[in-house]
Image: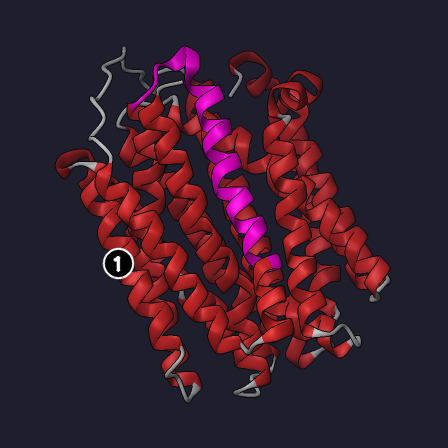
Amino acid sequence: MEPQLNRFFFSVFLFSIGFGIMTPSVPLFANLKLFANEWELGILGALAATPYVFGPALLGKLSDQVGRKPVIIVGLLIYVVTCIAYTMSTSLYHLALLRILEGVSFSSIWPSAEAYVADSTVAGSRSKAVCHYSIAWSSGYTVGPFLMGTVLAFFDIYSAFIASAAFLACGMLLILLLKTPKNIHEKKETLSDPNTGRGIFYIIYTMIIWGFVTLSFFFLFPAYAGSNAIIPSYIAYLVGIVGLVRTIVFVLYDKVLKTFRSATLPSGMLTLSVAMIIAWAFPSLPGFILSTMFLGLSLGLLYAYSLIYMLNKPAKGLYAGLFESSIGIGELIGPIAMGYLGFVVVPSFPYLFLSILGIISFILMLRAMRGFSQQGP
């Protein structure tokens, strides 16, 4: 693998640490400092997804035209400013505005980063490169919450926002030093094969569910765990477990794919259901540890398979944007719906609902297996 691409992966790792710090910091800050309830946390979680529904496809297409680096750098700069602004926030309205800015930043960064990897590789080596990229961002998201938990043990949550900004700035500086990759021209695919179009539909559905569950869990779980006597630093570590297991899946993905093959997506949906039912039935530290381990396994299986599939399509920025926009749709709907259910029913109910959703999706993915077994990711 080219040294240029390895440097890019390291920069992704650095700024993903910043994102990983922010993942538990924002809901904890909203809950502990501004006393946000489940419904308000759900709204805050969804606000970042509002621009993320359409932003990634538009900005991914823009990066096809102007290059990946400028779009990534602008997104990182927005997020650095956003992290610093969190330290001055005094109301939920301030957090609402900052969450929207987060969504704009994510829309700039992730489709362009994925397309950068695709630009730097050919189809034969792309699967390995995508796995390395996935390891880079996932390990950053893993380190971030553990680092945030350590910061909370010695300092306060405002220090976590500053630490996040520092890692983001370091990642941005490394991106600035990278060369723009040459766009490798490949034979373009078409959607004339009905299996291809159907495959994209199942991938889009998978990533909608991925976003629905991920943001619902990360934004509602801190308050749910806290109500079950889990201290804030342990909550951060639990979020870190999700990233740790997800990263292990990415590291072992070649072996995982050989094992699961076309059953990768159904297996991911089934483990998702198991993770959520454990969180609902056993709301304790051991139960949450087991639940987050299963959730990390699920997220790793679903994400890696789906991203490799999409980046083997033409117009890589656009297809990466569609991939991320699908996540955005789920992230918009999930926290609002689950936050409302947790507020009007009981805080544990969203996890039961998500378990049922996982089972329904498992059945749907079983029907999709035949088409995927013919195509592969």
- Residue at 37% x, 83% y: name it: 88
**As drawn, 2 above or below 167:** above
* 139 lies left or right of 294: left
Badge 1 amino acid: Leu
Residue 258, image x, y percentages: 66, 16
Number of residue marks: 1
- Residue at 42% x, 88% y: name it: 91
Foreground residue among 158 and 339: 158
Foreground residue among 316 and 12: 12
* 30 lies left or right of 194: right
Is residue 251 visible to us here? yes
Residue 374, image x, y percentages: 55, 12
Residue 249, image x, y percentages: 64, 33
Residue at numbered disc 1: 77
Mark 1 burial class by Cα count in 10 Å: few <14, some 14-19, many 20+:
some
- Residue at 31% x, 57% y: name it: 105
Which range of residues does the magenta coloring cover?
120-146
Quadrant hosting residue 76: bottom left
Is residue 367 visible to us here? no
Does the magenta run of residues contain 122? yes
